[in-house]
Image (cartoon, grey):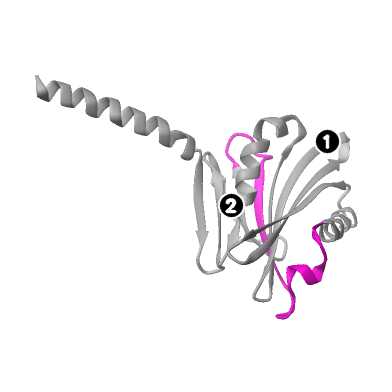
């Protein structure tokens, strides 16, 4: 009798634990110890080979089903004395990135900065940026980015999706972009 009661309790307990962990298991952790950064990314996303990618592109993941949803880590060199604040406040940096997007050669797209903020984590400041990007054919995308400077490197983490999916994934993407940290 006690064994069957104990077995039932264990089964219920394991189901409860599984149910509790499934929300947390909606994200996986990526750690790049060689480059000193980490982030969370959604289950069902896969790594993309970055050989032959644009200069500075270090990591790319995309959704296995919604292939247009992706995240990218780009690392650029800056002077060793450079800080995020010396580049400007969040809005200034956001506009500078927007100009770079809008002036990119051979790309017919127009970005608009719609939000810029800041977060601090472990004595580092991160600028959080949100863009709406219009592509040819009146296609609209939403991009969320986190930007940080550390040890002579400018790290840009970007996650994006199509306009039609943005409301559905916005909260998840905000968690992901806020998870990006350098160490």
**Magenta stretch contains residue 181:** no
Residue at the image point whose x is 50% and y is 51% from the top: 29
From the viewer's perspective, is residue 162 above or below residue 178? Answer: above
Identify the magenta region.
63-90
Residue at the image point whose x is 85% and y is 41% from the top: 135
**Magenta stretch contains residue 81:** yes
Q: How many marks?
A: 2
Q: Position of residue 105 (x, y in %)?
A: 88, 58
Task: State which quarter of the image contains the C terminus.
Answer: bottom right
Q: Position of residue 182 (x, y in %)?
A: 59, 64
Relative to 56, 121 lies left or right? left
Give 99 or 177, whichever is nearer the viewer: 177
Task: State which quarter of the image contains the N terminus.
Answer: top left
Q: Which of the numbered marks, if any, corresponds to residue 148?
A: none
Give 44 or 88, whichever is nearer the viewer: 88
Which residue is at the far top?
Answer: 1
Query: What element does badge 2 sit on?
Result: helix
Query: What element does badge 1 sit on?
Result: strand
Which residue is at the far left?
Answer: 1
Q: Residues within 10 Å of mark 1 (few under 14, many from 20)?
A: few
Q: Position of residue 128 (x, y in %)?
A: 72, 53
Q: Position of residue 110 (x, y in %)?
A: 89, 47
Image quadrant in which you'd find residue 83: bottom right
Q: Which of the numbered marks, if any, corresponds to residue 179?
A: 2
From the viewer's perspective, is residue 159 above or below residue 37? Answer: above
Residue at the image point whose x is 87% and y is 35% from the top: 137
Q: CA distance from mark 1 to mark 2?
A: 28 Å
Relative to 22, 64 lies left or right? right
Q: Which of the numbered marks, if any, corresponds to residue 139?
A: 1
Relative to 10, 148 lies left or right? right
Residue at the image point whose x is 82% and y is 61% from the top: 93
């Amino acid at each position: 009798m006690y064994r069957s009661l104990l077995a039932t309790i264990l089964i219920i307990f394991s189901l409860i634990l599984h149910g509790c962990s499934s929300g947390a298991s909606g994200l996986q952790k990526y750690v790049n110890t060689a480059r000193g950064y980490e982030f969370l990314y959604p289950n069902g996303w896969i790594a993309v080979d970055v050989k032959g990618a644009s200069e500075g592109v270090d990591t790319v993941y995309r959704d296995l089903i919604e292939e247009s949803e992706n995240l990218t880590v780009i690392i650029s060199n800056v002077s060793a004395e450079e800080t995020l604040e010396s580049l400007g406040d969040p809005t200034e940096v956001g506009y500078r990135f927007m100009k770079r997007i809008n002036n990119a050669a051979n790309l017919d797209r127009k970005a608009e900065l719609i939000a810029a903020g800041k977060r601090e984590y472990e004595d580092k400041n991160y600028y959080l940026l949100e863009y709406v990007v219009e592509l040819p054919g009146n296609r609209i995308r939403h991009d969320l980015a986190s930007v940080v400077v550390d040890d002579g490197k400018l790290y840009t983490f970007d996650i994006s999706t199509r306009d039609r999916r943005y409301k559905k994934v916005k909260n998840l993407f905000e968690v992901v972009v806020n998870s990006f940290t350098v160490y």
